[in-house]
């Protein structure tokens, strides 16, 4: 019963966090959509795709390791911090070195300076105190709420102020930079233990060994969630990329946010009750039912009233995104349900199941994205994303059944 109360509390805090950050994000988008044009959003989108890709392929799985690890994680903090700093430096250097090739690949010389600017972000984020994961591990979601809202709000305010002054896409990067600096400062002022420069290779090996499947999943998940955007940026133009990414943000992302809330809360809770399968199964069933009741009505709003959503949030120059939003609303519902199951797989230390489900989605997306984009443009990209999600469903059900069979034995 205690963990049920913890779950309710956690969902309440994380729900409040996601709702508040989504409100801030929607306000930010509504303002920036009137200050910047689709092509400018597309240019920023290229820089963001590059940053996300490098952050994903260098993912160490430290947070997942810390939550799965029994007992105190203090002994790992110093090593984890050194690894994080090294990762940030590596990502920044790669972005700087390959920025000319990246802007050339997307046929967008205007994105070159923005790509260079965004290289500062991972360098700063590498210094964040890894102990921030204790909020999630110890179910202290009220503290997580305060930290994330503060960082997110500062990011949004800075981006809007710089956009008003410059009318440039660089405003979005400035928001990320100042937000990252804020998170580093807060993570050292308010969170203990504070790391020092001390490295132990045995600890690093243990973290990386446990996190290899998380790294694989993260890379595949990046391809699944960004492969459509990469194809549009390469085959079409920055204006089309800006339209598509905006449609994605205001349709499928708010729906999948619900799943992210439950994953963040239920993963540590599931982990604590993983030894009692009947209790775990019951908790998982309740979670999935709750998510269905939340995401399906939400998705129907975007599916039935996409034009009204666009006009209200973005303005009439974004109306070309209307049919895309309708398709991505369905995609978002399916992805939300799949992602919610990932928390169960992680709790029973079956990270590879998450990887294989995501691989199925990448396969579905990969074989359809180019022909569909060539024939239907950004709408084709949305159909390709939906195809990938549908292909993932039977694979997800297969591994869910496998987990159930394993625990029955």
Image (cartoon, helix red, strand yellow):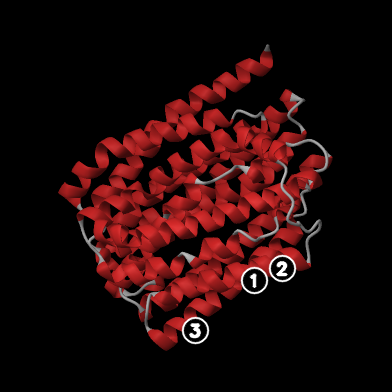
Of badges 3 and 1, the one in the foreground is 1
Number of marks in the rendered image: 3
Above/below status of 306 relative to 341: below
Q: For this view, does 8 lie left or right of residue 400?
A: right
Front-lying residue, 46 or 26: 46
Report x, y in % for residue 409.
Answer: 68, 11
Residue 341 visible in the picture: no
**Crowd rating for badge 2 (residues with CA inside 10 Å; few <14, some 14–19, many 20+):** some
Residue 269 visible in the picture: yes
Q: For this view, does 274 lie left or right of residue 296?
A: right
What's the distance in space between the residues labelled 3 and 1, CA to CA?
17 Å
What's the distance in space between the residues labelled 2 and 1, CA to CA?
6 Å
Report x, y in % for residue 302.
Answer: 40, 57
Report x, y in % for residue 407.
Answer: 67, 18
Q: Which residue bears the numbered disc 3? A: 161
Measuring 53% from the left and 24% from the top, which residue is drawn there? 399
Q: Which residue bears the numbered disc 1? A: 182
Q: Tell me which numbered mark, 3 or 2, is placed earlier along the sequence.
A: 3
Q: Which residue bears the numbered disc 2? A: 186
Q: Secondary structure at mark 2?
A: helix
> Going by the picture, which residue comes out furthest to the left?
375
**Crowd rating for badge 1 (residues with CA inside 10 Å; few <14, some 14–19, many 20+):** many
């Amino acid at each position: 019963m205690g963990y049920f109360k913890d779950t309710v509390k956690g969902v309440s805090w994380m729900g409040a966090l996601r709702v508040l950050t989504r409100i801030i994000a929607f306000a930010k988008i509504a303002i920036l959509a009137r200050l910047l044009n689709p092509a400018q959003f597309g240019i920023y989108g290229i820089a963001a795709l590059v940053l996300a890709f490098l952050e994903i392929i260098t993912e160490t799985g430290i947070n997942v390791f810390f939550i799965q690890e029994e007992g105190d994680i203090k002994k790992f903090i110093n090593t984890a911090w050194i690894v994080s700093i090294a990762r940030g430096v590596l990502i920044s250097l790669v972005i700087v070195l390959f920025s000319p090739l990246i802007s050339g690949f997307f046929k967008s010389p205007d994105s070159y300076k923005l790509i260079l600017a965004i290289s500062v972000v991972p360098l700063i984020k590498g210094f964040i105190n890894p102990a921030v994961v204790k909020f999630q591990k110890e179910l202290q979601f009220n503290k997580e709420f305060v930290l994330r809202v503060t960082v997110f709000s500062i990011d949004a305010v800075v981006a809007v102020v710089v956009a008003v002054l410059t009318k440039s896409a660089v405003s979005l990067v400035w928001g990320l930079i100042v937000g990252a600096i804020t998170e580093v400062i807060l993570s050292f002022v308010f969170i203990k233990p504070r790391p020092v420069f001390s490295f132990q290779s045995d600890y690093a090996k243990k973290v990386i060994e446990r996190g290899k499947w998380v790294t694989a999943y993260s890379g595949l998940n990046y391809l699944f969630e960004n492969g459509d955007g990469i194809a549009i940026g390469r085959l079409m133009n920055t204006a089309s990329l800006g339209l598509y990414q905006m449609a994605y943000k205001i349709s499928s992302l708010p729906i999948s946010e619900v799943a992210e809330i439950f994953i963040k809360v239920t993963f540590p809770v599931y982990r604590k009750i993983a030894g009692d399968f009947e209790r775990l199964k019951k908790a998982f069933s309740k979670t999935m039912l709750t998510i269905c009741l939340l995401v399906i009505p939400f998705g129907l709003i975007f599916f039935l009233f996409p034009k009204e959503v666009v006009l209200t949030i973005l303005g009439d120059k974004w109306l070309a995104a209307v049919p895309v939003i309708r398709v991505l609303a369905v995609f978002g519902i399916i992805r939300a349900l799949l992602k919610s199951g990932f928390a169960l797989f992680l709790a029973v230390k079956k990270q590879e199941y998450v990887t294989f489900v995501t691989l199925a989605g990448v396969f579905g997306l990969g074989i359809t994205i180019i022909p569909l984009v060539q024939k239907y443009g950004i709408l084709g990209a949305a159909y390709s994303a939906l195809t990938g999600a549908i292909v993932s469903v039977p694979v997800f059900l297969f591994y869910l059944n496998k987990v159930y069979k394993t625990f029955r034995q």
